[in-house]
Image (spheres, rainbow, N blue to C red):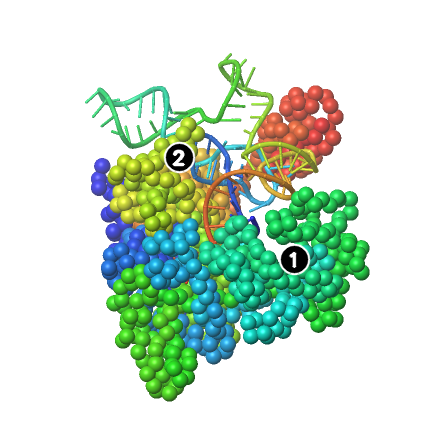
Amino acid sequence: MTTDELFQANRIEEDAQAAWRAGDVYRADECSDKPKFYCVSMLPYPSGKLHMGHVRNYTINDVMYRYLRMKGYNVLMPMGWDAFGLPAENAAMKSGQAPAKWTYDNIAYMKKQMQAIGLAIDWSREIATCDPAYYRWNQWLFLKMLEKGIVYLKTGTVNWDPIDQTVLANEQVIDGRGWRSGALIEKREIPMYYMRITDYAEELLANLDNMTGWPERVRTMQANWIGKSFGVRFAFTHDIRDERGALISDGKMYVFTTRADTVMGVTFCAVAAEHPLAMAAARNHPELAAFIEECKRGSVMEADMATMEKKGMSTGFSVTHPLTGASVPLWVGNYVLMSYGDGAVMGVPAHDERDFAFAKKYGLPIKQVIAVEGETFSLNGWQEWYEDKQRGYCVNSGSYDSLSSVAAIDAVAADLAAKGLGEKQVTFRLRDWGISRQRYWGTPIPIIHCETCGTVPVPEKDLPVVLPEDCVPDGNGNPLNKREDFINCLCPQCGKPARRETDTMDTFVDSCWYFMRYSCPDAETMVDSRNDYWMPMDQYIGGIEHAILHLLYARFWTKVMRDMGLVKFDEPFDRLLAQGMVLNHIFERRTDKGGVKYYAPEEIEIERDNIGKIVSAHSLADGKPVAYAGIGTMSKSRSNGVEPLDLIDRYGADTVRLFMMFASHPEATLEWSDAGVEGAHRFLRRLWQYAIGKSANITVQTNIVWKEQSKAVRRLRFDLHSTLKQANFDYERAQYNTVVSAAMKMLNTLEAFNSEADAAAPAAIGEGLNILLRVLYPIVPHTTYILWEKLGFDRVFGSLLDTTWTQIDEMALQQDEIELVLQINGKLRGKLLVLANASREDIETVVRASDEVARYTNGKPMKKIIIVAEKLVNVVV
RNA sequence: GCCGGGAUGGCGGAAUUGGUAGACGCAGCGGACUCAAAAUCCGCCGGUAGUGAUACUGUGAGGGUUCGAGUCCCUCUCCCGGCACCA
């Protein structure tokens, strides 16, 4: 065997990558007469190492890039780094290393890993969001938004660790305690900057209908998140006064409801712990004050709010029902959020599940005001049909009796409006976006605090406000607060000494527009005309976990830029591929302080029961048990990522790419297992050896009259071209796992072809290999690129990178006879061979004459014969 | 809890969107080659019954629509993603 005949992945990949590097073949520009195609993967957080989720994401992107380039597009695939964020600060606390250095080191390492995969990235456009040249434009747009009132100041709730004296992220709160201190976490209200995303709620929702390039599931999730609802906002009146004796909120307590038809069934109201009425009630009511304090502890997360025990306490006060004048008891409820709506809700236990549970628990009255024809109301349990607005009508509701729920909503709204106590209102579940973070490693918020002038925006000429890169967070608050050199400045308005804001921006700000900056990474403005060429993006690819937050924020940001005249489009992403998560087992141990330590699956030995379920696990290092926490997304923070580099070293990048694409549909969730990598490698070896073995004996002939060739040659071409047809279909719908199957079938077909003596065999095999290499190239570019040259195809068709996509020969697909499936009463009973142009009558004749029909109908008359063209016949008896 | 998605052989998955369930591959079993092993090649491979042709059964569970359901509808179970400060 010569060295050529051996499949040496490392050598092949080095050679191919060297050729690409030398030709700078992935650099894209804006001067092309081809149509542009801009495809982007969601930029990675530089956590330290790539894991299989990244490999999957970027390989999908790379396959799409190479396929579309062959289809004749001017394609651009850039890459960058979401470089700000919490993990860098966490690493700093562990190692004492500055987040900046940690981040840059990680970027360098991960870039090397990406290059090993052979991705067609135009690295000349690389961006790191921690670069002042990038984040200065976050600051610039922030100031523009502040000017226009899109950014405003408001208080927001954060997790406060009273021992470490620091604000914690939700992730750092475990079972209500700080992850490092173990202290019980408190909620704290602090001033924060907000972006008015709610001003765009209507448009963000409306556009979803037309975004047909997005998966339905993502559009549905966003629509539900925005959550448009039609209801009535109205007030219960009261005469509760604050400590200075002033009537609170002019004696009106506002609530919002989508079920105004049930207002006559209100038996209590509840307010949030921070509501002014609750504060007033607590003044002379120590027990209530204690309860309010209790409500202020605990989680700020919606999931916890929704699952926690619903608790309440009476304020002792009442409010007045706006329609009946009845006195309604006022409660404080731990499930009412001050930050949502008006911080108060009406309670209708008969027609709301949560109110029902609350009323049962505290012995509050339950009053039925809606009935449904033919159904019986019961006080014993919640009945979900009361949710159904279409079927209900009012009872026990005075003048509203017998009105349908829908009509009653209008009538109640009109009556409330007449009294000046309420009106119909459209509300959104979506809340404004709080972007202030009390953290170091992020974009500094460009604000200066002056004792004389108040909060003053940093003038545009002073941008960027540069973040010092040598701070080392220690877990006690934002280290910027200790940096006098950063904090001390002069007020831009009065020139007196002032202090710089130390809060930084949410990292979601960084990822709102990086994909535009790729188009013009060196621009002197935020974006320039090159952005008009590449954007809107043709294809965005990223994990389904970003279905709501990142994608919604980026859409919002784009609209803000549009309204400022910076871009001309309404939506940034034409098509979206929401890649499924790559999951792996998670193992953990609780630390003494209540934190969690994670263990990598390779450090663990597991025991399974007889159905294969994991029942226990222990650490290989210390032999002691660890808890199995199920499976979840691969991430550095949970130590369950699998690195690609080991596999690449062992098998080569093409094997890893092929295996990853073959493993499942790009949008499907994937539980990681490397069983089968061996098979992917085996396939490439077979391909290599087959192609090299045939290289001396193939031709590239185009003047052959195929229909005059032998049956074996015609059969070979039929199989190859019909498989190609499937592969083309699957490329178009980005279902790459079945493209790999198709390629495997093609190789099987070629290997099984044994009529080598046929005069046309060298041309047929040559054609087959030519098709196969093109079909496989986007997935395994190194191997196919080198083989393409070894077979001499480049001399006829040019480089594989820019050769055209393969045409199907429709003539090869023509058949004289086709096989139909014969079903009797829907059960498979046989096959029928009919002429390709057989008419309905012809087919029925064949059916009636068939043995199967005689055998299975037992002489019973045929009721119907259903014929599905070119597929199947079903006889109904 | 709420919103979105998923469940198909021992395993990963396919089924061109209501028309042959299990393509393609992994693992396994049997055979060839070999002194032997590896590699490679050939064959088998959902379950039950049968030597076999074949029959029945089978796509998380239960019901329904249809000539025909993995695919559509209803109810349920479990798993994954998101829930606004992980990114």
Residue type at numbered disc 1: Phe
* 2 or 1: tag closer to the N-terminus: 1
Give the secondary structure at mark 2.
Answer: strand
Q: Which residue is mark 1?
A: A268
A875 left or right of A15 in image: right
Q: Is residue A502 above or below residue A44?
A: below
Q: Chain of mark 2?
A: A
Query: Would you call the spot at circle 2 few (<14 residues within 10 Å), some (14-19), or many (20 or more)?
Result: some
Q: Is residue A150 above or below residue B83?
A: below
The reply to whether residue A501 is visible in this rendering is yes
Q: Chain of mark 1?
A: A
Please identify the residue farthest to the bottom as the structure is shown: A494
Q: Which residue is mark 2?
A: A614
- Camera-side residue: A647 or A709? A647
- Camera-side residue: A655 or A745? A655
Quadrant including the N terminus of chain A: top left
Locate residue A278: give its quadrant. bottom right
Name the residue located 30 percent from the left edge and 52 percent from the top edge. A49
Distance from the alpha carbon under mark 2 to that under mark 1: 49 Å
Query: Would you call the spot at circle 1 few (<14 residues within 10 Å), some (14-19), or many (20 or more)?
Result: many
A161 left or right of A332 in image: left
Locate residue A497: give its quadrant. bottom left
Q: Residue A678 at x, y = what percent?
A: 33, 37
- Camera-side residue: A767 or A396? A396
Residue type at numbered disc 2: Ile
Name the residue located 42 percent from the left edge and 27 percent from the top edge. A610
Quadrant including the C terminus of chain A: top right
Name the residue located 65 percent from the left edge and 52 percent from the top edge. A364
Give the secondary structure at mark 1.
Answer: strand
Closest to the camera, between mark 2 and mark 1, is 1
Name the residue located 74 percent from the left edge and 30 percent from the top edge. A863
